[in-house]
Image (cartoon, rainbow, N blue to C red):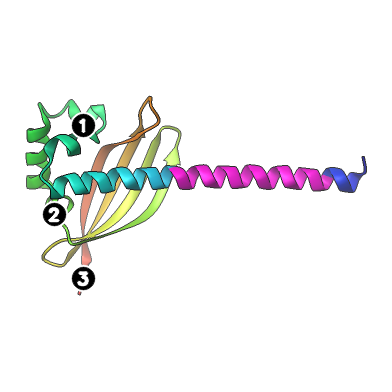
Amino acid sequence: MSVVMRSIEACIVAATLWVATASAEESAAAHSRATIERQFEAFARDDAEAAYALADPTIKQMFVDADHFLAMVRDRYAPVYRHRNVEFGDFAESGDDASLTATLVDNDNVVWTALYSLRRDANGDWLISGCVLVQSEASAI
């Protein structure tokens, strides 16, 4: 086999691996976003059980039950609990851990940045393992 043919084959293999890696990361990002969106939907319905089901076991250990979890979110994470707009940003994955940023606009037009941490469970599902919420200097129109 000629050197040119081997080089072409090597390029094809490298491109295939790159596309597969990019596709896997895009898939992980999409699944992470979907988890957070499902939790937002559960909060909007005041469905404590559904919201709690999307929390990582480390979060569940901090709260006796779903109702206590929902009460904490209402009290300490009001923009996560109720907002009028969300836009997802950067996603990063490292093994079974990931982070995803979201920009939230609350009902008073205050802009917030939420940095979510997620952990992949044994079934391959992403669960929310934390959220850091920071108020932005910007305001929405």
Between 38 and 95, the one nearer to me in the picture: 38
Q: CA distance from mark 1 to mark 2?
A: 20 Å
Say which residue label 2 marks: 82
- Residue at (38, 43) in percent of width and height: 31
Q: Is residue 10 above or below residue 63?
A: below
Tag 2: amino acid? Arg
Q: Earlier in the sequence, mark 3 or mark 2?
A: 2
Tag 1: amino acid? Ile
Rendered location of residue 100, percent (x, y): 35, 48
| Residue that protrudes farthest toward the bottom in the picture | 141
Q: Looking at the rendered structure, which numbered label has been put on residue 59?
A: 1
- Residue at (27, 48) in percent of width and height: 37
Tag 3: amino acid? Ala
Q: From which residue to which does the magenta span run?
A: 7-27
Which one is closest to the eye, mark 1 or mark 2? 2
Say which residue label 3 marks: 140
The residue tagged with tag 1: helix, strand or loop?
A: helix
Q: Earlier in the sequence, mark 3 or mark 1?
A: 1
Rendered location of residue 84, percent (x, y): 18, 62
Q: Is residue 3 above or below residue 135?
A: above
Rendered location of residue 1, percent (x, y): 92, 40
Q: Residues within 10 Å of mark 2 (few under 14, many from 20)?
A: some
Q: Looking at the rendered structure, which numbered label has been put on residue 118?
A: none
Between 42 and 111, the one nearer to me in the picture: 42
The residue tagged with tag 2: helix, strand or loop?
A: loop
